[in-house]
Image (spheres, rainbow, N blue to C red):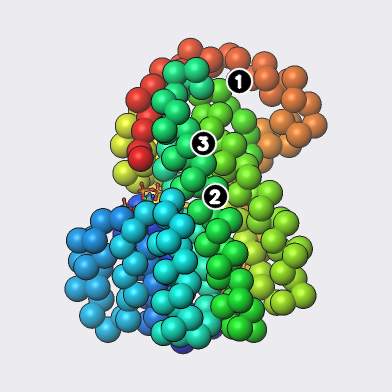
Amino acid sequence: MELQGKKVLITGGTRGIGRCIVEELIGRGVSHLAIIARDKSRLKGLQEEYPDVKILKIAGDVADIDVLREAAARIEDKWGQLDILINNAGIISAGPLEELPDEELYDQVAVNFTAVLLLTKYCIPLLKSSGDGHILNISSGLGLLGMPFYAVYGSTKAAIGHFSDCMRRELAPDNVHITCSFPTATDTDMMQKFEDRKMDAPAYVAKRSLDALLNKELQVVFGGQEREDHVALNFNDRKKFDVIVAENYEARRASSAGHKAL
Ligand SMILES: NC(=O)c1ccc[n+]([C@@H]2O[C@H](COP(=O)([O-])OP(=O)(O)OC[C@H]3O[C@@H](n4cnc5c(N)ncnc54)[C@H](OP(=O)(O)O)[C@@H]3O)[C@@H](O)[C@H]2O)c1
């Protein structure tokens, strides 16, 4: 797919993976972008950095239904259609479920899942108008493998994988294609409070995810052969995978402690 002339909406395009996706899109010729994020100054800064790109700056929280409705209404008004929707914004709060504050449980569901359902819903008529619509959903490796201390985050991300399959099948007759990306640990603000292993670069995750969307791949799974082996084992022999996870139980608890980006 040629990106020049395409109209793109992305949530969370101001930092991390989303910011790298924006840079990649602009580098490949996109000049009409709508971006939803809470921090107004970052949206403004992005426009200053790319004065030739028309950026519809939608400052707000994706957990606010009015922000999502406004985004779709403004796009309809300005562009009349949408070619690519990228559901990227996400938050995390890890830890044992019994200790997770209720608000952080609700917020993760609202931002990581409910907002994706609603924004996709509002954008469907615009994507149909494109005639060649695409959706890229950013899930997580924690949505493929259920890990202790990430029950809420992981469940929202698993839901994104499932939602992607449902909608790809539902929208196939309308020529709207859906790709789901499952990054592993990636070096962004979200991982500032996570102390563990080496991470992927956000620019790499952005480029590979975008390539998957352009090639109409159904999914892209990061984390190499070990991740693929674990996903297969988790599907075929959950008890065996339970044993592997249990081996590092305390280390997992320690590395998830304080892992928050809200
Ligand atoms: N980093 C990783 O290791 C990793 C691994 C797997 C999957 N992922 C997923 O990849 C996606 C991007 O993560 P990231 O690491 O790039 O995150 P990040 O660096 O924390 O950036 C998050 C982006 O989303 C926006 N955002 C967050 N909450 C929002 C809200 N309530 N309303 C509107 N915008 C919001 C932020 O802007 P504002 O703060 O201005 O709103 C920012 O632009 C997420 O869905 C995440 O779950 C990340």
* Residue at 56% from the left image edge and 78% from the top image edge: 126
Question: Would you name the residue on which mark 2 appears?
Answer: 114
Q: Could you give the CA–CA distance between mark 2 and mark 3, rounded to whole angstroms?
A: 13 Å
First in sequence, mark 2 or 3: give its number.
2
Say which quadrant the N terminus sits in. Answer: bottom right
Q: Could you give the CA–CA distance between mark 1 and mark 3, rounded to whole angstroms?
A: 17 Å
Q: Quadrant of residue 61?
A: bottom left
* Residue at 51% from the left image edge and 53% from the top image edge: 115
Label 3 CB-ligand 1 distance < 8 A: yes
First in sequence, mark 1 or 3: give its number.
3
Question: Would you name the residue on which mark 3 appears?
Answer: 153
Question: Would you name the residue on which mark 1 appears?
Answer: 245
Q: Position of residue 14 (x, y in %)?
A: 32, 59
Instruction: Using a 10 Å C-alpha cutoff, classify the residue at mark 2 as few (fewer than 14 neighbours), some (14 to 19) or many (20 or more).
Output: some
Q: Nearer the viewer, mark 2 or mark 3?
A: 2
Residue 77 placement, left or right of 126: left
Instruction: Using a 10 Å C-alpha cutoff, classify the residue at mark 3 as few (fewer than 14 neighbours), some (14 to 19) or many (20 or more).
Output: many
First in sequence, mark 1 or 2: give its number.
2
Residue 72 placement, left or right of 260: right
* Residue at 32% from the left image edge and 76% from the top image edge: 55
How many labels, in total? Answer: 3
| Tag 3: amino acid | Tyr
Q: Quadrant of residue 223?
A: top right
Contact, mark 1 vs mark 2 (Cβ under 8 Å): no
| Tag 2: amino acid | Thr
